[in-house]
Image (cartoon, helix red, strand yellow):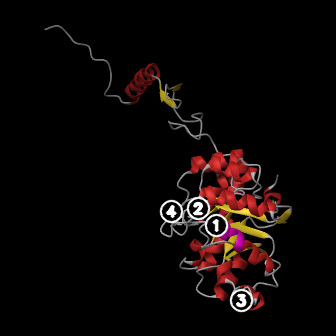
Amino acid sequence: MSSEQHQKDGLTIGGRTVNSRLFLGTGRFPSPAVMQQALEQCGADVITFAVRRVNLDWVQDDAILQHLEDRGLTYLPNTSGATNAAEAVRIANLARAAGLGSWIKVEISANPRTLLPDPIETLKATELLTLAGFTVLPYTSDDPVLCKRLEEVGAAAVMPGGSPIGTGLGILNPYNLGLIVEEANVPVIVDAGLGSAVDAAQAAELGADGILVNTPIAKAKDPVAMAKAMAMAFEAGRLSRAAGRIPKKRYASASSTPEGVPEAYWAEGDLGGRSISPERTAEQSAHTGLQAGSDAGAERPVTVKGG
């Protein structure tokens, strides 16, 4: 696949294909205008927002959504604030009834300090909402076994966190994320904890199908520039993974061969690199000494006469 084809490669979730693999959260931006500019720069097709922050009686007049309804975006309302499966199901039904669509991001946390997802309640809610006809994208911990269970009960994609929401700590457990990617038969979207473009690139190189970003863009010194950086970094990471990185090695190896180096006699070293053979070194030293002697008139053999 060429780099141009790779960049146009869409992401399909629940039968719907989106062009951008960066999903954008809409909270914490300095203003709706800055959020719109960031959206334009990152090219996101999917935006997420907390249902509890939307006026469900007048969705068309919502402070955020009223500026976005003509963009052809896919809405991914989330159940942020839910502490159990029953609350998440109720929030999802309210969102769908208000015309926000059937995509739902399950987000359940019982600990306001860590905001880590509750695995048991998340699994319950995912199963119930799938049976109710929703396209469910659960936010979960980076547990490979749990992600597989979520897939088995109907998750259209799994969204493991790189680290706790809003911390900017990046991907703390790349090994687990790699296992999740290897085992998954649905898209893997890294959600939460990313801090900068380097984390976006790492997620892509580990094989993630997409990322969901909010705080690192919204709270950056320049949100608009960071939005562009995040999108570009993720695509760079995908290209890097497709190109294939070199294997890691313990010792160095020269990037150029010794051919053409004057007076150099090389032999294979024990460490995988190249070293000068002792025999060649001695031979070269003798040769150099004779050469120097012939050039310098003072260095001639001396005959010692008896006394």
Residue 202 point in image, percent of width and height: 61, 56
Q: Disc 4 vs disc 1: which is toward the camera? A: 1
Q: Earlier along the polypeptide chain: callout 1 or callout 2?
A: 1
Q: Amino acid at mark 4?
A: Leu
Residue 157 point in image, percent of width and height: 74, 58
Q: Is residue 287 magenta?
A: no
Q: CA distance from mark 4 to mark 2?
A: 17 Å
Q: Earlier along the polypeptide chain: callout 1 or callout 3?
A: 3
- Neighbor class of circle 2 (other Cα within 10 Å; few <14, some 14-19, many 20+) is many
Q: Name the residue located 83 percent from the left edge and 58 percent from the top edge.
A: 5
Q: Is residue 166 above or below residue 157?
A: below
Q: Which residue is mark 3?
A: 62
Find numbered disc 1 in the image and state the secondary structure of the residue it sits on: loop
Q: Which residue is mark 1?
A: 107
Q: Earlier along the polypeptide chain: callout 4 or callout 1?
A: 1
- From the viewer's perspective, tell me whether residue 263 is left or right of residue 224: left
Is residue 77 at all visible to an observer of this figure?
Answer: no
Residue extending furthest top? Answer: 306
Labels 1 & 3 near each other (Cβ < 8 A): no
Q: CA distance from mark 1 to mark 2?
A: 7 Å
Q: Is residue 267 above or below residue 29?
A: above
Q: Disc 3 vs disc 4: which is toward the camera? A: 3
Q: Disc 3 vs disc 2: which is toward the camera? A: 2
- The numbered dot on residue 117 is 2
Give 245 or 17, whichever is nearer the viewer.
Answer: 17
Labels 1 & 2 near each other (Cβ < 8 A): yes
Q: Is residue 136 above or below residue 48?
A: above
Residues in magenta, as a range: 85-90
Q: Amino acid at mark 2?
A: Pro
Find numbered disc 4 in the image and state the secondary structure of the residue it sits on: loop
